[in-house]
Image: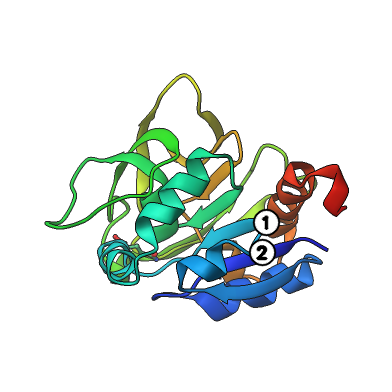
Amino acid sequence: APVIGVLALQGDVREHLIALAAADAVARPVRRPEELDEVDGLVIPGGESTTISKLAVLFGVLEPLRARVRAGLPVYGTCAGLILLADKILDPRSGQETVGGIDMIVRRNAFGRQNESFEAAVDIKGVEGDPVEGVFIRAPWVESVGARAEVLAEHQGHIVAVRQGNALATSFHPELTGDHRVHALFVDMVRAYRTPESL
Ligand code: GLN
């Protein structure tokens, strides 16, 4: 099975580890550059994107992560993780960095404050069957995407799921629902990326 890391600096790491295991991956937390070297794919969880970016600098993992993503490492970001995968943040906080990887501009906290969090059914391209239950918690939306990025889902006219090559991002949190179809989609992306020798 593919080994998939969850960037474990801050945020809902445990929920992603559980969802990945349910989707037949070997899941493990990643904090240090050496741990990053050992995974076939990486999830960047929900949490607080400025905090995660500052801790990534402190742990020396931001630059190695940028390099691996540029080299094609499959990555999946939820909510704060989506923000970290954006090439550009419309309204960054001071000191906020991104990993990048998806040619898109994101707006933080676009759907409102914590107490305006909500759930909504979301149809995602590439996920078969019923819509996914989207859990939006102080969620960003994608303001615009460049030509290389593919929009996978919208909610009320706003882009909430995007894929570009091996990078996948959602504004919402499939790891909180017990429905593992989005994680299964990502595990399939990781399987497709791995070299034949390691299969
Ligand atoms: N609003 C948070 C941020 O800016 C994201 C919230 C979340 O991950 N649920 O990072």
Name the residue carrying label 2: 4
Q: Position of residue 110 (x, y in %)?
A: 29, 50
Q: Nearer the viewer, residue 118 or 140?
A: 140
Determine crowd level at label 1: few under 14, some 14-19, many 20+ residues with C-alpha closer than 10 A.
many
Is 65 drawn above or below residue 103 in the view shown?
below
Task: Say which amino acid is labelled 2.
Answer: Ile
Q: Is residue 119 visible?
A: yes
Label 1 CB-ligand 1 distance < 8 A: no
The label shown at residue 40 is: 1
Residue drawn at the location 47% of the way across and 75% of the way down? 8
Element under disc 1: loop
* Residue, far top: 147
Whether pointer 1 and pointer 2 mark residues with C-beta atoms closer than 8 Å, the reply is yes
Q: Position of residue 69 (x, y in %)?
A: 50, 45
Which is more N-terminal, label 2 or label 1? 2
Residue drawn at the location 45% of the way across and 37% of the way down? 102
Q: Is residue 134 visible?
A: no
Determine crowd level at label 2: few under 14, some 14-19, many 20+ residues with C-alpha closer than 10 A.
many
